Image (cartoon, coloured by chain):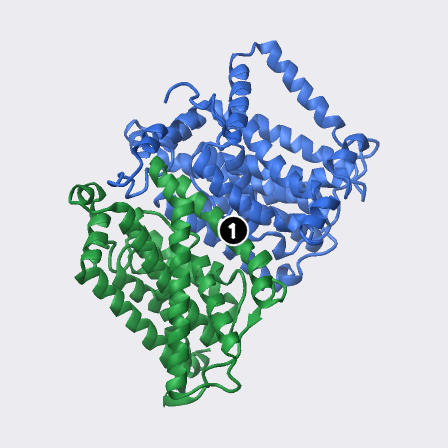
Amino acid sequence: MKGNGVTGNANPLRRLGALFDGARDWWEHAKVWQRYLVYLGAIVFALILPAPVIGEFMSPGSDWTTVLIYPIGTYMLLAIGLNVVVGQAGLLDLGFVAFFAIGGYSVAYFATQYGWNYWATVVFGILLAAVSGVILGAPTLRLRGDYLAIVTLGFGEIVRITANNTDEIGGARGITNVPHPPDIPGVVEFALLPAPYYYLMLIAIVLVIIFSVRLQKSRVGRAWAAIREDEDAAELMGVPTFKFKLLAFAIGATIGGLAGGIYAGKAVFIEPNTFPFILSATILAAVVLGGSGNLPGVMLGAFVIAWLPERFREVDWLKAALGGKDPAEYRILLFGGVLVLMMALRPEGLLPSRRRKAELHEGTGGMGTMGAEVPGPDTDVSTTEAAK
Amino acid sequence: MLDDFLNQFLPSTVGGLVFGSIYALVALGYTMVYGVLRLINFAHSEIFMIGTFTSLVVITAIAPASPLTGIALFGVMLLIIVLSAAISGGAAVLLELVAYRPLRRKGATRLTALISAIGASLFLQELFALVIIPWLTGKPGRNQQSAPRIVDRDTVFTIGNAAIRTDHIIVVVAAVIMMIALDRLVNKTKIGRGIRATAQDPEAAVLMGVSIDNIVRITFLLGGAMAGVAGALYLMEFENTVFNVGFVLGIKAFTAAVLGGIGNLRGALLGGIVLGLIENWGAIFLGSEWKDVIAFTVLVVVLMFRPTGILGESLQKARA
């Protein structure tokens, strides 16, 4: 791989990618004060984000603060969680929504049936999600990567169908009247107004980002990178690969559970169909689109995927072009197409980390290559060479 | 409980065999592609869905006033099977060309290819729901679409309290014929030898003059055609379909392929039948709403204890 190798290309996706690569390279060489300035700017920006002036442009059709909580904030939190599993440890999890569901159902069930305090149910939901991550991971993490993907998909469906068939937790009707978080006297009052939930979500996202970055820079993060690049080599070098993969699953599940807990506190009502497979696929699309393994990229991906359908929901010319249909209906079609295109043109995502990009171009970092990758007699040799 | 089980055992077994035959046909596509490319072709379930809709359109166009019998039935069944196989096979070849070939050229990782496959699967489902189904049927694309009945539910004979009906016999016999034909093709012909050689060692196959691109294309064509046949049989038996009919059925067919030993053609047959039976027998105890959970649990348990499946993995040693 020679440098970035993508500049000077007419392909617009690559040009956009080169722009992002430039930003990343600046960041890598930025001084400490510059970085803190950026952090400060980001936090100030996040604090004033719900302002109606911004909302008017960002989501003319619906309440901007509500959109910021779900889908934008929720998707971001989920994407950061899935990024630990997919981006950092290199394990493809297609049933991530299961942990979101477990977190959400824990809050709803224990708050309505046993009258527990909201914060207690959130903590309990997180624990339950982490435990189920370990329960799912312990028997399955010894599997090959692609088998793991299908097993996790099966797990996600098992959780959803079980919720659907169990009357104790409301069956197909779900749980209604989930209580709001209790007020903190004199500081904040959680009721129907969305703003407090936005700031709660913001605090959760900031904490999770700090946690995730610290992890990535620690021994754990290095172990994950080693596993992702070459599991056998990592094992031989004395990395207890199984333990670290299990840890990645548990941490991803924890973050998923947290997202579920916050979601349930705001939503008042949850049902099994809140947690379909398509949500797992959407979050995966966000992680991959943004640049799996790179936190700013993943957050950008989640933002784009959550925001675009909302933004174009009520745009008249687009609606007219589609024959009166809600443009948001086309979002999954678009995600599917984007996934295929991204994999063909820029598999490392819009905003990848340098390391992850190198891995993908060298064919490490994910289960090895496909079986019949050997060029045949009629293979166009120039494309094969260009990719190297 | 035990009385229930004994009472329903034989009818459930028949149902399990019918479902199992369809799982097995779809599983063949997963198994062949996995054998050659080491790729889970996640969009294979949509190839099956395309087969069901091809049959739906043909049957609706013929629109028999009453269920068919004799030579007319044979002709119509043959027609929907051939057309569904052709269209599904073509769709599978196109899928390979668009979603996988560019990646193969670049030597992309299998994780990349699997994500591309998921993208292709979502894209095809939504394309059908939003555009193609409304265009074909004139009804909202996300609704269940039902087809007119072409086979009478006549009981041909009974075993104990299980009635074996005409449609059961058609599904099982057609599936078995297709599988024998495929087995012969892979084991006895030159094309089959190319497929087995590629599965065994792609580099050596290239050196021996096998065109990998051709073999991959043929593999997708054959797998797709089998899914198309499965789609035709499914529509004839259950008389309805929907844009995401392939999702759960696809995962179960993949489970069947793994259960029998992925990459192994006869394993796919065995896996399909075993999965169909386990699922139906389990449903007697737990109720049919737990069927999917039973199938997914089987998948997890098989992968935990015998990830190479019952017969072991190998397309190259399909004879075993």
- In the image, A367 versus A123, the foreground residue is A367
> Residue A149, image x and y in percent?
42, 47
Residue A346 horizontal side relative to residue A127, left or right = left
The residue sitting at 73% across, 35% down in the picture is A58
Residue A35 horizontal side relative to residue B10, left or right = right
The reply to whether residue B256 is in sight is no
The residue sitting at 39% across, 36% down in the picture is A243
Single out the residue that lies furthest toward the right. Answer: A186
Residue B132, quarter of picture: bottom right
Of helix, strand and loop, which one carries label 1? helix
> Residue A99, image x and y in percent?
55, 46
Quadrant position of the N terminus of chain A in the picture: top left
The residue sitting at 72% across, 40% down in the picture is A67
Residue A233 horizontal side relative to residue B66, left or right = left
> Residue B202, image x and y in percent?
22, 44
Give the residue pinned by disc 1. Answer: B122
User: With respect to residue B45, does A262 lie above or below?
Assistant: above
Residue A66, quarter of picture: top right
Residue B77, quarter of picture: bottom left
Q: Which chain can be seen in blue?
A: A
Q: Which chain can be seen in green?
A: B
Q: Mark 1: few, some, or many residues within 10 Å (few <14, many ≥20)? A: many
Quadrant position of the C terminus of chain A in the picture: top left
> Residue B178, image x and y in percent?
30, 69
